[in-house]
Amino acid sequence: MFNLVIFGSPGAGKGTQSDKIIEKYHLQHLSTGDMFRAHIAQNTKLGQEVVSIMNSGQLVPDDITIKMLEEEILKHKDAKGFILDGFPRTIPQAKALDAFFEEKGEKVNLVIQLDVSEDEVKHRINERAKTSGRADDAQDKLIKRIDEYFQKTIHVLPYYKDHNKLEVINGIGEIDAIFENISKVIDNHFK
Ligand code: AMP
């Protein structure tokens, strides 16, 4: 199995690059944000529990998030590997993921940080808002998620750096050029 964590602020291009990685390497996409949004859309018990937290742009508690992710991993017994997008966002989540994979003889093989500065992502989403006419509250929510990333989530990176798993990719430039750099890093670890 090849398990990849993709890390980056909202607006850093994580979604675009994840799609390209999935297409090329056939990894199973696991996005905890998408999972929560599906629970909310289906109005499940979990969805009702997390809707106000998500709307405020804060993080869902670790125990809820970890349990949901582990259950999802177990559903994909035939996966060649996973791309984790939006998880882990805290050190306890990172440690829980390591313990979970270890039990199965697996591991996080590689962590890619798509590096775009806070000023640049905020500039990008302001530009996007101008062209898409995104509603003000959606824009405010996005800013809160970006703040959350730069204040909290980013502190998970040293954990992976210490385990020699972190590769930093410059997220500014042409989509295809960025993907080429990502591919090189993946190919080096995939062998
Ligand atoms: P995302 O689409 O990954 O930006 O996630 C959207 C929202 O879902 C976040 O702002 C959090 O409220 C929640 N969420 C997603 N992943 C996690 C996570 N790993 N830990 C805690 N909350 C999460």
Image: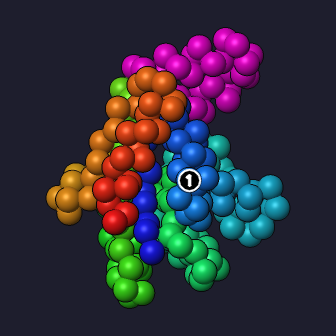
Res. 102 image quadrant:
bottom left
- Taking the image as shown, residue 43 lies to the left or right of residue 95, namely right
Residue lying at 66% horizontally and 54% vertically, measured from the top left? 34
Q: Residue 131 lies in magenta, yes or no?
A: yes
Q: Residue 119 lies in magenta, yes or no?
A: yes
In this view, 163 is above or below 72: above
In this view, 127 is above or below 138: above
Note whether residue 116 is visible. yes
User: Please, what is the three-letter code of the amino acid marked with disc 1?
Assistant: Lys
Note whether residue 32 is visible. no
Q: Residues within 10 Å of mark 1 (few under 14, many from 20)?
A: few
Colouring convention used in this rendered image of the protein: rainbow
Examine the residues drawn in magenta and state their main secondary structure: helix
Write the start and end of the magenta stretch as one range: 118-143
Image spot of residue 97 (x, y percent): 40, 72
Camera-side residue of 129 and 109: 109
Image spot of residue 180 (x, y percent): 43, 39
Image spot of residue 173 (x, y percent): 43, 23
Could you tell me which secondary element the residue under label 1 belongs to?
A: helix
Camera-side residue of 6 and 151: 6
Q: Residue furthest left?
A: 162
Residue with the mark numbered 1: 24
